[in-house]
Amino acid sequence: MTESPEAASRALDFCLLIPIYNDWESLNLLIKEIAGVLEKGALQAGLFIVNDGSLLPSNLEASKPSWQAFQFIEIIQLRRNIGHQRAITTGLTTIYSQRPCPAVFVLDGDGEDKAEDIPRLWEKYQEHSGQKIVFAERTRRSEGFVFTVLYKTYQLLHLLLTGLPVKVGNFSVIPFWRLSNLVVISEMWNHYAAAVLKSKLPFETVSTSRGKRLIGKSKIGWVGLFVHGLSALAVFGDIVGTRLLLLTVALFLASSLALSGLFFGAALLDFNLSQSMALLFGFVLLFLSQTLTMAAGIVFFVLSTRNGAGFLPIRDCPFFVEKIELLSSKNAELSNED
C-alpha cells in the first residue's frame, strides 16, 4: 500500500523548490549547504528540483550523502526549456495540484540565495502564523561595479514607471494555501515576484545580503537579465502604459504652451522668430504627437487583454511537465508513480 502525498506531507515543516538549467554542480553544493541548515535547525523538509530542459546530465550522485537530511527529493522534468520564471510557476503549480506540503520555499540553485537565510525567513513566516508570503529583501549585493550601476538604474526606472520599488526576488516562503491564489494569476508566467506584488497578496520581508555563486559563472547573460527586467515591467503593463501616456500628455501640453507663448511674444514685441527655431518646435510637437498616439495605443492594447483569460498556470502549466521522478525518500513506501 502506498502513502498519499497528503499523508507524506504531514511530517514536513516545508518543501523547497529549486529551478535548474544545466547548473548541476552548483546544485550539488547547495544541497549540502541546505542539508546542514536542516540538520542544525531540526527541520523536516522535502526538495523539488525543476529541471528546466537542461542539456547536461543531472549528475546529482555526488550529493547523495546529504540527501538523508531531506524527507524526499523529487525532480520535476519539463518537456522543454521555458525559462527561470516559468519553471518556478510550473513547479509551484505542480506542488499545488499533485504534491501538497505545508509551505514552499522558492530559491535559486546557484547559491546566491543563501541556505543560511532559510531559518530567518522561516522564523518570520512563523511569526505571522503562516498567513503571509515572506520574501528575502536584498539590502546588499555582491556583484561588480558595472552591474551595480545598471541595477540601480533599473530600480529607479522601475520605481518611476510602476510606483513600486524593486526590493525582492525569487527567494521566499509561501503558505501552501496561498498557492491557490497564485496558480490563477496569469502574470506569474512572466515574473513570480512581480505577480505577487501586482496581486496585492499580503507579504513580509527579511533583510538579507545576496550571496555569491557557489561555482562557475552565471549563464543568464546580459540579454537574459534585460529580458528578466522587462518581464517584471510587463506585469505592470497597464500602470506603465498609463504613466507613459500621462507623461507624454504633460510634455505635449507644456511644449504647446511654450510654442504658443513664443509666437505670441514674438508678435507682441515685434520680434522676428527665426525659421529654424519655428521648425525645431514644430518637430518637437510632431514627435510628441506621435509618441502620445503610441502611448495611448499601448494603454488600450494592455487594457483590452483583460477581456481574455490569457495564460492560466493551473490550467496550462501541466502541459509542460513530462514526468515527476522520485530520487530519494526516507519513506520506503512513498510511490514514484505519476
Image: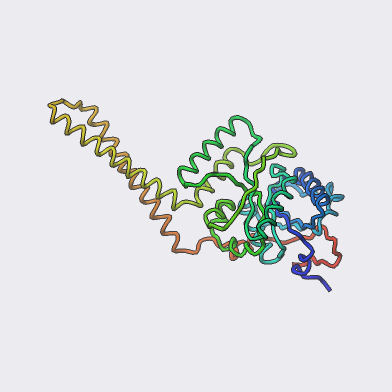
Residue at image coords 30%, 35%: 284
Q: Residue 100 appears at what percent x and percent y? A: 71, 65
Q: Is residue 50 visible?
A: no
Q: Position of residue 142 (x, y in %)?
A: 66, 35
Residue closest to the eye, 89 or 199: 199
Total numbered badges shown on the rendered structure? 0
Q: Which quarter of the picture shows residue 184?
A: bottom right
From what the image shows, is residue 292 above or below residue 182?
above
Nearer the observer, 213 or 52: 213
- Left/right placement of residue 102 relative to residue 157 reads right
**Is residue 109 or residue 61 the one in the foreground?**
109
Quadrant position of the C terminus in the picture: bottom right
**Which residue is depicted at the point 83% across and 54% down?**
69
Taking the image as shown, residue 280 lies to the left or right of residue 13, namely left
Viewer can see residue 188: yes
Position of 26 relative to 310 (above/below): above
Residue 148 locus on image (x, y percent): 59, 34
Residue 125 position by quadrant: bottom right
Q: Residue 326 location, x and y as percent?
A: 79, 60
Image quadrant holding the N terminus, namely bottom right
Residue found at the very far front of the displayed protein: 127
- The residue under the point 14% across, 27% down is 269
